[in-house]
Amino acid sequence: MSANLNLASESDEKVFFYENPEGAICLEVRIDEETVWLTRQQMAKLFGRDPSVITRHIRNVFHEGELDKEATSAKYAWVQIEGGRKVEREVDHYNLDVIISVGYRVKSLQGTHFRIWATRTLRNLLVRGYTLHEQILIRQGFDEARAALEVISGTIREQELGDKPSQYAVELIKKYSKTWQALWEYDEDKPITSPNTKPVIEALDYSAIKEVIDIFRQDLATKSEASSLFGIERENALKAIIGNIEQTIFGKSLYRSREEKAANLLYLTVKDHPFIDGNKRIGALLFMLYLKQEQISHQLCPDALITTTLLVAESPATRKESMIRIIMKLLI
């Protein structure tokens, strides 16, 4: 598989070229807004299905409420040769969430290859340009700011310069310096590179997870808090999510830390709707169980877990990477 970069005009859009391992499929893939985009015709070529089949599956993905059409589709200019001349038209494109959903439905192995390629390509774009030197400068900048605030704070206290609101403001700025850094990193789309992240201890076990969900269903049913559809898996969708999280490239895990896997487990279980009913509750439970399995210490009280889960559920699909970073920040 290969990807050749071709920058498009003055926008942030980029065009890559995807080839499957056998070299039989070559697609021009648009990358924009932190995700990849394909047309229906391109998906038909990727999955080896008739375009009408792809159209039907896309329609069902939106009709069943699995994904939000407005958040996961967009129109981009597409140049076609018609009657010997170039014609530019606005063509519907669909992002990686839709591509993956259609891939599950048509049960295409090519979908797995493409997902791995797309995830790796997006990750490379995310970290490209952030050199070690730049990270050191950023770190030094925050350390110097903290030091300066300590000097200012000390001067206010010792010489009684400024009123009480000024003193309070300085203390707040000092106390929540990590908060300002985290919010800045979010705005700048900085990757999570904390020394506190650690490698995974144990892989996710699909059979064990299914047993946990059965126990959970029985417990909720006794309290009349679960329908008969609670925890019923959609066509091995949970198994596919676990496969996504545990996937490897060249013998190395795609997700390099236990915190990254935990964040993706919560996000994908809540957003991809692998169950007919109970996705948010099951996602929150599996997330907490994984934190315990991997011995990840955290400060998530029940209310914080509710807030985090609902934040994921209500977030637009285009902000997936941002949500993953937020969850990782909570853990780190």
Image: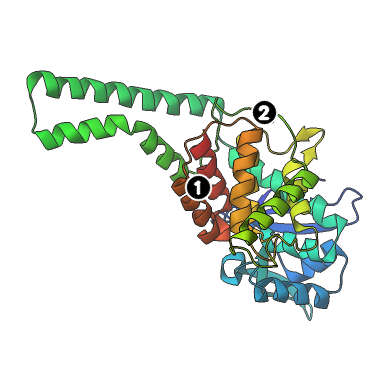
Q: In which image quadrant can residue 57 be found?
A: bottom right
Q: Is residue 8 visible?
A: no
Residue sitting at x 64%, y 61%: 221
> Which residue is more in the foreground, 72 or 7?
72
Instruction: Say which amino acid is labelled 2.
Output: Pro
- Expressed as whole percent of the image width and height from the top left, the position of residue 157 reads 13, 22
Give left or right: position of 220 versus 111: left
Indicate which disc residue 24 carries. none
The crowd level at tag 2 (other Cα within 10 Å; few <14, some 14-19, many 20+) is: some
* Mark 2 secondary-structure assignment: loop
Q: In which image quadrant can residue 205 be found?
A: top right
Q: Are marks 1 and 2 in contact (CB under 8 Å)?
A: no
- Expressed as whole percent of the image width and height from the top left, the position of residue 145 reads 31, 26
Q: In which image quadrant can residue 104 be found?
A: bottom right
Indicate which disc residue 305 carries. 1
* Mark 1 secondary-structure assignment: helix
Give left or right: position of 109 versus 57: right
Residue sitting at x 59%, y 42%: 288
Q: Between tags 1 and 2, which lies in front?
A: 1
> Which residue is more in the foreground, 34 or 71?
71
In the displayed image of the protein, which residue is found farthest to the bottom?
83
Residue sitting at x 75%, y 70%: 40
Q: Is residue 192 visible?
A: yes
- Expressed as whole percent of the image width and height from the top left, the position of residue 100 reads 74, 59
- Specify how the rendered protein is coloured: rainbow
Instruction: Say which amino acid is labelled 1.
Output: Leu
Indicate which disc residue 199 carries. 2
C-alpha gap between disc 1 and disc 2? 23 Å
Compare marks 1 and 2 and give the one earlier in the sequence: 2
